[in-house]
Amino acid sequence: MALTNGSVKAALDHLEKRFDDFKGVLIALSRVPSVSAEGFPPSEVRRSAEAVAEAMRGARIENVGVLEIPGVHPYVYGDWLHRPGAPTILLYGHHDVQPPGRPEKWVSPAFEPTERKGRLYGRGTADDKAGVMAHVAAVASYLQSSGALPCNVKFLIEGEEEIGSENLGKFLEKYQDKMSADFIVLSDTANFDTGVPALTYQLRGICQVDVEVQCLDHPLHSGMWGGPVPDPVQVLSKLIADLQNKDGSLDVPGLYKDVAKPSQKQLKRIRKLPFDEKKFKKEAGLVDGLRLAGEKGYSVYEKLWTRPSLTVIAMESHPIQGSSNQIVDSARARLSLRTVPNMDGRKAGWLLIKKLTGSAPHGARVTARLNGTTPWWTTDPEGPAFEAARRALKAGFGKETAMIGAGGSIGFVQPFADLLGGAPCLLMGVEDPPCNAHSENESLHLGDWRKCMRSAIHLYDELSRVEVKRG
C-alpha cells in the first residue's frame, strides 16, 4: 500500500473539489460558542468537542473520542495508525475560544460566521478551529482519495488552551499512553504575512498577577472627602505606571537577571526579515499619531519575541454606568507579564509582586497574588524535520518560509516536547497579521487557509521520508 506522488496529487485534487464542504464544517464549528473562560457555559465547550469529534469521524479518522478529566474542559482524540514502521505525527490544536468581547464592535455577530471579501469573520474562525480543520481536511483528502496516509497520525484537540492549559499535567498522567509520536505539529501559530508562510521556533511564556489597592472600608462622597483622602484608582494607576522606566524597560528589580541573550544565529534570522512600520501600525489598528513603545535599542521583532513585556489586561473599580461622585474603596488590576528564555515564570511573578507591594503611596493597603504561569519555549529550527516542513510550506504557498518567533504563549508545547524526548516541534498555523485573533472581528483569510491545507498534505508526505531514531 505504498503511496506515490500520485497519491499526493490525488489528495490535492480532492481538497480542491471538497473545499467548500470543509469550509461548511468550519462554519458549523465556529457557530458553537466554546468559550473556556470562567463565567461562560462549560456545556458549550463540550458541545464543541462533540462537533469536532463528528468532523473527525466524517474525515475517516479512527478511534475518535472525547477524552475526559473530571472538572476539565474536554479534549478530542483520534488517529490513523496503519503505516507500520513509518513515522507518527501528533497533530495538536484547540477547539476552545476567547470570549467574544464587545458585541457592538463586531461588524457581524461573533458566533455567526460571515464571509466578506475573501475572509471568514467570527470568533474561533482563525484561532484555532481553522487550524484544526486544516489538518482534518488534509487527512480526509488522503483517506477519501487514496484510502491511506503516507505516515501515521494522531490528533489531540485541546479544550482549555485559551485559559492556559492549566490541567495539562493531569491530562498527561491519565492519557500518556496515547501520546507517543515522532513529530509534533501544532496548528496554532501565525504566518509572517498574508500569503507568506512561517515556522515558529520560539514562544514567550506568560505570568499573570492580580493586584488590589484598598484605601477605605466603604466609598465616600468625593466632594466632602476628595483631596485629603487618597483615591485607590489613582494609587493603583501610579503603581502600574512605576513599573516602566523612561527607556521602555520594566522597572522590576532582578527581572532582567535571567533574560537570555539571543544567539547571533537568531539575531541574523530576525534581522533578515523585512519590516514595514506603516503596515505594522495599520494591521495593529493604532490610532493616528500613536508612536510605537517598548525598550529602546531593540527592533520591533526583538521586542516581540526576545524581551519581556507587561500588559494591563483588566482593571476594575466601578463601572461608568451607575457611577456617582464618590471615592471608591478599592481598585483591582490583572497584569500579564510575558517571559522569555531562561526566565522562571513564578520567580518573575514574585519579583513583580514584591515591587507592587513594597512601597505603596500614602500607605495604601496593597495585596497581590500570582494567578498562574505558562512556560516559554524555544528550539533550534534546523535538521531534517524543519527542512521537510519548509519544503511543504513552499509547495503549499509558493513562497519561501519565514523563520519567526512569537510573542504569545502555548502551554502545550514544552510539556509535550519533554514527554516525547525532544521530538521536533513544528509550529505552523493559519493566522495572518490582520486576523484580529483575541479581538473583535476575528477573521480567517480563506485563500491562505487553502494554502495551509495544501501545505499539510505535502507535510505528511515529506515527514514520511524523514528518518527517525527510536530507542
Image (tube, rainbow, N blue to C red):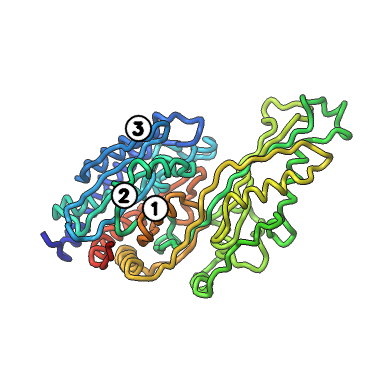
Q: Mark 2 points at which residue?
A: 179
Q: Which amino acid does label 1 sit on?
A: Phe
User: Mark 1–mark 2 contact, CB under 8 Å?
Assistant: yes
- Amino acid carrying label 2: it is Met
Dot label at residue 47: 3
In percent of width and height, residue 309 lies at: 61, 55
Seen from the viewer's position, the closer of residues 17 and 219 is: 219
Ranked by sequence position, the earlier of labels 1 and 2 is 2
Q: Does 286 sit above or below residue 98?
A: below
- The residue most toward the left is 1
Q: In which quarter of the image is residue 468?
A: bottom left
Residue at image location 50% in from the left, 33% down from the top: 38
Q: In this view, does 261 lie to the left or right of 162?
A: right
- Residue for point 36% across, 68% down: 399
Mark 3 near mark 2, Cβ–Cβ under 8 Å?
no
Q: Nearer the viewer, mark 3 or mark 2?
A: 2
Q: How far apart are marks 3 and 1 (CA)?
A: 26 Å
The answer to whether the residue labelled 3 contacts the one labelled 1, judged by CB atoms less than 8 Å apart, is no
Note whether residue 117 is visible: no
Mark positioned earlier in the residue sequence (3 or 1): 3
* Front residue of this view, candidates 400 and 87: 87
> Does any portion of residue 130 appear in the rendered image?
yes
Q: Residue furthest front?
A: 471
